[in-house]
Image (tube, coloured by chain):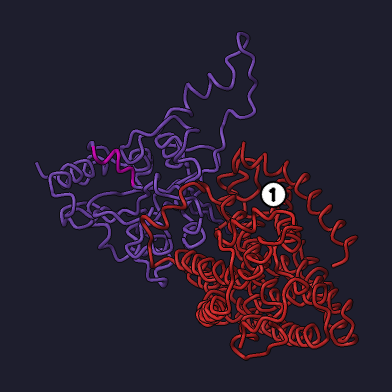
Chain colours: A purple, B red
Amino acid sequence: MSNRMPAEDPLIRMQRDLKRALAKKPGDVKWGMVIDIARCIGCHACTIACVAENKLPPGVVYRVVVEQEIGQYPHVSRRFIPRPCVQCQKPPCVRVCPVTATYKNEQGVVVMNYPRCIGCRYCMGACPYTARCSDFGDWYTSNTPELPGKVVGRTATAKGYEARPAAEYGEDWPERGHGSPVGNARKCHFCLHRLAVGMLPACVTSCVGRATIFGDRTDRESLVFEMIGSPRVTRWKEELGTQPAVYYLA
Amino acid sequence: MRENSFRILLGLGVAGLIAGSLGMGVRLILGHVPMAYGSYVPWGLWVAFDLLFLGLTAGAYIIVVLTYGFGLKQFESLVPLSVFSLLVSLLCEGIIISLDLGHPLRVYRFLVTPSFSSMLTWLVVFIVAMWLIFIPFLYFLLREKLVLWSRDPGRKGRKIYKALALGRTEYSDADRERDRKIVRLLALVSIPVGFVFFAVPSAMFTDMLGRPHWSSAILPISYMFASYLSGCALVTLLASVYHPQEAVFGFLGRLLRGFLILFLLIEFIQIFFGYRTDNPVAVAALSLITKGPNAWIFWGVHLLLGSIVPLYLLTARPRDARAVAWAGFLIVITFVAVRYNAVVPELMAYDLEKRDLFFIHRRLSQAYVPNLYEWLVSLWVVSLGIVVFLLGTRWLPVTPAEKGGEQHAS
C-alpha cells in the first residue's frame, strides 16, 4: 500500500517521519514546523496542550494563538495565527545572552540551559517575535486558603500538580519553588523531551485542524519538507534575517 | 558642607533606608512575584535607575579628563570627592541591577561562561574595569592622608586608617612621587575606557532587532551625552557644595549648560526624526512619551524641572554657587525620568498583534506602572548611596577641605 494515501491523517505520516528522523544521527536532523493558517480554527487547544505538557505557571506561555479580524461589518472574516517561538537559525536571543544560557542545539532548536540563566531578561527584549516569557515564580494556588485539617489547602493542592516539575529538556528538575526554572527565561523548545521518546510535540498532536505540521526539514520524504516547498509558504519577519524554522502557509 | 545640612541629609538617607527596607524585605523574601514588570515589559524602574547610576559616574570621568587630560589644575582638589561619588554610584548600580536579576547569585556566570557577542557582557567587563581603575586610583590618591591620619593620636578610628594604609606608618617624598605617577597612569587609562563605557549601555539597546526607536545610530550619542549631562550635574552640585570657588563651579556650570543644550538638541532630533520615519512602533513609543498617560514625566519632570529651570538658573545666575547647585540637583534628581523614557515606552509600544488579549495575565501585559515595592527598593538603594557618600565625606579624606596642595595632576 502506498504511504502517500490522500486520506491518511497527517499525524500518522508525521509519526512515521519522526520514527525515521530518530533513526538518524541527532546532528543530521533539523526540526521544522509548518503552520497552515487556513486550517487553524482558533480553538487554542495547542496553547492549552503546551501549558499542560510543560506545566507552565501563570503568566508563562509558549504558544499564543493570535486572532485577527479583517474587513468591516458586514464584510468581515477572521483568521487565527499560532505564534510559537519560530526557532530562528540566526537567533537574536542567543547573540545577546551574556552567559550562553541559551543556544541553538545541533538539531536547530533554540534551547535554554536553566541552571546557567541569570534571569537578566535581555533575551526577551531582543526577541523580535516576543516568544519568550520570564518565570517570575507565580503560582495558580497563591490565593487559595490554607486551613489544615479543614480544606485541601494551598500547599496540598500545589503539591498535587503545579509543584511537580515538568519534563522539559528531559531533566530531573526540583520541585517548583526551589530554583530554576523560576527566575529564568522560558520558551518553546519543540517538546524535545517528547521527541526523544518518539512523541510529536504537544501542540502538534492536539491540533484538531491538523494545522501544525512538524518533522525533520532535511528529510525529503517528510510532510514538513513537502509543505516547506509550497508556493504559499512564508516566514514571519523574514526581513530581519533571523531565518525561522517555523513556516506559515498563508 | 555645614553640620546642619549634613545631619539633615544623613537623617533623610537613614529615613529612606528604613522606609525602603519594606520593599527590600518583600524583594528578598517573595522574589519578583509582587513586582509589576512582566514578560512583554521585562525591564522597568530598576533598569532606569541602573542606567541613571551608570550615567552619574560620568561626573568623575569629566573631572579626571579635565584634570589629567587637559591639565586644568583648579579641579585637582575635586578629584577625590568625584571619584568617591563614582564608586558610590557603581555600588548602587551593582545592587539595583542584582535585585533585578532572576538569579543574582549566578553572576559568577559572567566569568565562567561569558558570551562576548552580548553587549551585556561588555557592559559588565567595562563596569569591572571601572572598579579596577578607580579603586586603586582613589587609594593612591588618599594614601598619604590615610598614613597621616593613622598616626594622628587625636583622630577617631585610627585603627581603620591604619588598616586602610595597609600598615604603612611612614610616607616619604619618594612614596608621594610614586603614588602620583600611579594615579596619573590610571587617570590616563581611564580616559579611553570611560569613553567606551558610557556608550556600551546604548549598544545593549541598539543590538535589539526590530526595535525602531532603539535601533538608531544616534542612540549611542544620546546615551553618552545623557551620561555626561547627569554626571556633570552631579559634580557641579558637589563642587558648589564642597568647593564653592567660582573658578571651579563656574566652569562646571558653563559646561553643564553646554551639555544640557546639546542633550536637548539630540533629544529633539530623536523625537522629530522618529516621528518623521512614520514607523508605527517608533511613533507609538514616541507618542507614549509625549502624549501618553505618563507624558507628565517628559514635559513636567524632565523638560520643566530637569531642563528649563536649570537652564534658567545656569544662564541667569552662573556666579551664584547656590543657584548652580540647585541646577545640578534638579538635573540629577529628575534624570531618572530620562532613563525611564529611554527604556519603558519602547517595550510598551512594541507590536504584539494584541497577543495580550488572547492569553490574559498581568505578566503578559504591555501596561506597566512601577508599583510601590519597586519604588521602595529604588528608594532604599538611593538612600544607601546618600548615606555611604555622606559618611565617606566625613570619615575619608576625600573632601577638598581635607585634601589640597598635592601636585598629583602635574
Instruction: Give whichever of A45, B365 is nearer the camera.
Output: B365
Q: Position of residue A11 (x, y in %)?
A: 27, 41
- The residue beneath circle 1 is B377
Callout count? 1
Question: Which quadrant is the C terminus of chain A positioned in?
Answer: bottom left
Q: Is residue A99 magenta?
A: no
Q: Amino acid at mark 1?
A: Val
When asked about the image quadrant of residue B225, the answer is bottom right
Question: Which quadrant is the N terminus of chain A positioned in?
Answer: top left
The answer to whether residue B383 is left or right of residue A56 is: right
Q: Dot 1, crowdedness within 10 Å: few (<14), some or many (≥20)?
A: many
Give me the residue at 48% from left, 28% from top: A163
The answer to whether residue B244 is left or right of residue B71 is: right
- Element at badge 1? helix
Above or below, B114 against B133 in this view is: above
Q: Which span is picked out in magenta?
A: A190-196
Q: Position of residue B213 (x, y in %)?
A: 59, 73
The chain containing the residue under callout 1 comes to B
Instruction: Give whichever of B341, B274 is nearer the camera.
Output: B341
The answer, for residue B356, to whether it is visible in the render is: no
The answer, for residue B318, to whether it is visible in the render is: yes
Above or below, B174 against A138 in this view is: below
Instruction: Give whichever of B49, B393 is nearer the camera.
Output: B393
Give me the residue at 32% from left, 59% from top: A245
Give me the residue at 69% from left, 49% from top: B377
Q: Position of residue B136 (x, y in %)?
A: 54, 68
The answer to whether residue B21 is left or right of residue A3 is: right
